Image: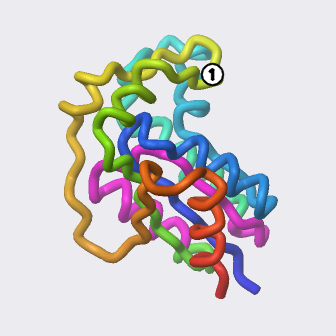
Amino acid sequence: MPPVLIVVGGLPASGKTTVATELARRTGFSYLRIDTIEQAIVRSTPLGNPLGPVGYVVAYDVAADLLRTGVSVIAECVNSVEITRNAWRDTGTAHGARVLETEIVCSDPVEHRRRAETRDTGIPGHVPPTWPQIVAREYEPWTRDRLVVDTAERSAAEAAALIEAAARP
């Protein structure tokens, strides 16, 4: 059976990390988190934020290595522009993986803001975007099908179960 690349995208504080972490626990798939990769780059190089495409490019290459060896991958990132969405899809298909693109949304703006203002990212030194930065962020509309999961309506466990079911052949 070919590996699966599940791309979990969405605005900061929408619930991506919580859902992707639960999904990784359920499936045993490798889990790549762009925030972790980017913070490691900032911590260990002279580079600073914003990094631009650097963290994503590192993640594409790590995902490619894993997929090449038959290991399924969950990639969690904002994935706000079509170029990154295409790059994830191309990474998966180039290495024989089935690709499931998911968009995590939080349809309740009060809850979304609460999450943004109270969350602990769990990454030492990482400073998450503020609520005004989240609302002002560039986020291109999707132009192709994807699985949309609303974390204002589902728990992380329910969201992970929905994604896991969609990822089955």
Report whether 2 appears left or right of 13. right
Q: Residue at x 62, y 80 (%)?
A: 96
The answer to if 77 sits in the magenta stretch is yes
Q: Is residue 108 visible?
A: yes
Region of the chain picked out in magenta, as a range: 67-92
Q: Residue at x 23, y 34 (%)?
A: 137
Tell me the SS state at disc 1.
Answer: loop
Q: Of 100 and 114, which appears nearest the observer?
A: 114
Q: Residue at x 67, y 46 (%)?
A: 21
Amino acid under label 1?
Ile
Residue 89 to residue 59: above or below? below
Local crowd size for mark 1, using a 10 Å CA cut-off: few (<14), some (14–19), many (≥20) = few
Is the image coloured rainbow, by chain, by secondary structure, or in one colour?
A: rainbow
Question: Residue 160 is drawn in which quadrant?
Answer: bottom right
Q: Which residue is mark 1?
A: 123
What percent of the width, then of the height, locates residue 157? 66, 55
What percent of the width, then of the height, locates residue 156? 60, 51
Residue 109 to residue 147: above or below? above
